[in-house]
Image: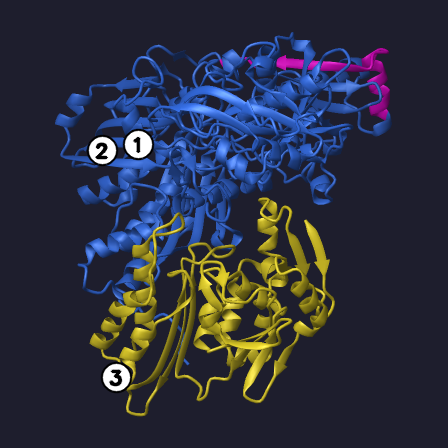
Chain colours: A blue, B yellow
Amino acid sequence: MRMRIVGTSAQRKEGIFKLRGQALYVDDYKLKNCLYGATLRSAIAFGRIKKIEFDPDYSWQNFIVVTAKDIPGKNCVTLIEQDQPLLAEERVLHPMEPIVLVAHSLRSKAYEALNHIKVEYEAHDPVLTIEDSLAKKQILRRPDNVFKRYEINKGNIKEGFTKADFIVEGEYRAPHQEQAYIENNGVSAWVENDGTIVARGSLQCPYYVHKALKIIFNLPDDKIRVIQAATGGGFGGKEEYPSMLAGHAALLALKSGRPVKMIYDRHEDMLATTKRHPAIIRHKTGLAKDGKLTAQDIEIIMDAGAYITLSPVVLSRGTLHATGPYECPNVRVRSRAVATNSPPNGAFRGFGAPQTLFAAELHMEKLAQKAGIDSLELRRRNIFKTGSKTATGQVLKESVGISRAMKECAGISRYARIKKECDRWNKNTNNPTWRGIGMALAFHGGGFTGSGEVMLASRAAVALTKGGKIEVLAASTEIGQGATTIFAQIAAQALGVPYEWVEVAVPDTGRVPNSGPTVASRTTMIIGGLVRRAALQLKDEFIGKAKAVPKTRAALIKAAKLLCKGKSEVRFEVQFEKPGEIVWDEAAYKGDAYGVFSYGAVVVELEVDKLTYEVRLRNFFSAQDIGKAVNPLLAQGQIMGGSAQALGWALFENAVYKDGVMQNANFTDYLIPTALDTPAMKIKIIEEPYSHGPFGAKGLGEMPADIPVPAVAAAVYHATGLWFGELPILPEKICHEMLNRYSHNSLSPCGRGQGEG
Amino acid sequence: MKFLKAHTPDEAVRLFGQHPEAIPLAGATDAMVAWNVGRLNGKIILDLSAIDEWKTIQILRNSLKIGSLVTHAEIQRHPVIRKKFSLLAQASSQIGSTQVQNRGTIGGNIANASPAGDTFPPLAVYNALIHTVSFRGPRVLAFLDVFAWVKKTRLHPSELIEAVEIPYPSPVPKRWMFRKVGTRSAMIISKTVAAGLLWMNKDATVNKLRFALGSVAPTVKRLKTAEAFVAGKRLTPDVVEHACRIMADDISPIDDIRSTAEYRLQVSQNLLRSFLKF
């Protein structure tokens, strides 16, 4: 019996439960005697806490109150460093920083009580912009406010510019972006009779939470247990913050001896939790007459916010993708992540790459325009091929699907023809819109950067219970992307058993091995690979001890008895092994930054309304090389969803900040696209297999967020002749630039619009 | 939160007379937002949603009378409204989302008095009349007289909107337009929202212009200056341009987190220009 389940659009394992409303999210679990926690947050951006006063006229007797003094272990949220306190003690470094926790059996009472706590501050002048941070208005991080810096050097940048016939410079600015998951952050926690602290929540990385709680409570591994509840989206927004939230809920649970739920509403979630890093990116590029790049000099500065959190690795990925998918003999990339008094910025789909690829790709358009070369032709002459050397000197040995992606995308979008049609349309001044088309390319490294995967040493297992259940055990979380389905497909295929036989365990640190975090487009490519290896071990056991892989349920139960030998289950657990040829030098920032890259192209067709300057997306095309689509429907879903998020960042999402506080922390005023704003999407999946990925698979989840934004900016340029180097491209900005272009009293061009009766 | 429920107009008038501080509730689409952020804590709610008498659309000889509890969904589906008051039908179909349109009512929309109310520019150019009731008796107000300021009406304490009456435009206008501008296609608060009616004389001069804008002043505004200026004139490019320029006399757009004054004014001018241009 030969089964093919990898490569088919198998039904989502957890889909039916979500469809029927049976999936249990953190707030759906009924907990006996449960209290609800609320957080008192800093009202100022930067300063010293002088006094915390509890209203003496307010009845506090049914409340549990927690401050930094109640923390049994270390007051920090451990991530890369331990600089971020769980609760601010003496000073606050950003608005919304947690100071006091309150719990009550009524959620509304817990929030009401916050109004009866007064914090007296000595406020300092805060650092609110990248510019202020670089100017060292205040020193937030010694010695110079720089959390992390990188430098990549290849060839000789000076010589590169002397060989250039054209030199083009540009500055690009990428703003905050909110992850806007459908379910807000939420964690519940309780203490078991044996003193074990249990946290269950909406989260991406159970073992990150586990690691943080151990240090907060000064407890050994086995006295902390973290369980994932059904999770309504993550996109990076539940990579780090759940560690903070779990710490808060667990502190209240420990003090009260009762279970505690902390569930943010949308407003609090948007005010307090992480967002995509704002960044300034400057390019100076040399180009020879023949259209070959001679030099790329790139500077990146990211706003990390008040604490270091994940910024070094976000910056790293941004830095490593800053050149775009092009080969250039002389490259210098210098990058910095700097401290400001704003809530820490964090992980978001793409992880630094969307910012730098926006700049790289829009700069490519600018370069083409200045040099008088078609921008597709310019890309064609410089894109990566098999054997190309990246900025870090990584030689691309296999699975380089970028030429194909570009060609296929230009084909399905009829790019050249539509471009001419737009030009024709724009010549007729009676038309109500300006039309444009734009293309962008991207590459995206799968898995952790450099030696990251080796250091993670991820583990995953496949177990067979004596009752005949085949179960995948991994800490990788289902956050809507389809992890459980993919794991079951991979295990079923490796074993040669029906997909329905394979179950995937709930990520529970008490049961599943540490597979590392669910981030970095690594779940299919890295953990899927471990699942496949573990499944193959079980297959060998079947063949060795039961003569064959069972073909019927009855045979499976029989084989299970044989293999388990009286024990409840037999487990096959494997650990990540670095492919031998990968070499990375962290100190010099040279070598194989990633095991492999995925590649993609996007074409966006849009029109700009001449009366309202609103951009309407007409069509969207993408071709993406992901090695192998384990589940083509889920892969398309990932590409469409990531693209829609990116389109929102390009055109709608405008996080307004004042004194470090987001002013539009709600979905009425922070606009994300609705279904009506999202264009029809045509997706082409390209499969250039990767030899170390399961069935050839590479990373998929993040790249869709990298490509659409510069394609939109290029299309807006094509339509209007205006460059927008700063996102989002709002109608207000287009209007402003149009008014600048046409003198004040003359008319801005407009067409016929309204219905006539 | 205390909850009162009225089942008939008389009961509503009586209860509101006894509790003038109560907050009337119709479709609850705005009340739910206020409730969520705690603004209704400790307040009295007067639920009107069971009053069937205010849920009908009456076709009269010279006008249409829409009960205050008629939903936006019912308005946009109504054949006479679609034919005779298409601007109102269009506005009703662009409020919030389908879900909001199914719950939200025309009376609730007016009483909420948002500067960005999407039905307001159409009601303003149709010269709608607002019928109210209270223990003092019934009253009729011109639509524009209802609004005092942002989220403030001139309704008396204990006064409820019973119906919205719109006279049929006679003769039928030569041109009409409605346009909501809000960047996103649904669930969006307008940055500017416009409605216009234009009647022409036989000699190609303007007989009458009515043009109203929302979101560009504390309350919905008719462009009285521009309307008066174009009356009796041919719509030459100069006349159209001047009408657009003097728009600034009647509106006062602002910069806020949703948009800019520059954008609101420019787009409002573009909309008027395109409406007047041949």
Q: Are marks 2 and 3 in contact (CB under 8 Å)?
A: no
Which callout, 2 or 3, points to the residue nearer the camera?
Answer: 3
Q: Which residue is mark 2?
A: A292
Q: For numbered disc 2, what is the local secondary structure?
A: loop
Viewer-side residue, A85 vs A551 = A85
Q: For numbered disc 3, what is the local secondary structure?
A: loop
For label 1, the crowd category at 10 Å Cα-Cα, with few meaning under 14, some 14 to 19 and many 20 or more, is: many
A676 w.r.t. A188: above or below? below
B212 w.r.t. A328: above or below? below
Q: For numbered disc 1, what is the local secondary structure?
A: strand
Q: Residue at x 15, y 31 (%)?
A: A164
The CA distance from mark 1 to mark 2 is 26 Å
Whether callout 1 and callout 2 share a subunit is answered yes
Q: Which residue is mark 3?
A: B233
The CA distance from mark 3 to mark 1 is 53 Å
- Residue stretch in magenta: A555-579
Which callout, 3 or 1, points to the residue nearer the camera?
Answer: 3
From the viewer's perspective, is A279 left or right of A542?
Answer: left
Chain letter for the residue marked with disc 2 in the picture? A
Which callout, 1 or 2, points to the residue nearer the camera?
Answer: 1
Q: For residue A25, say whether it is visible.
A: no
Q: Is residue A565 magenta?
A: yes
Identified by mark 1, the residue type is Ile
Chain letter for the residue marked with disc 3 in the picture? B
**Residue A459 location, x and y as percent?**
61, 15
A588 w.r.t. A268: above or below? above
On-image quarter of the N terminus of chain A? top right
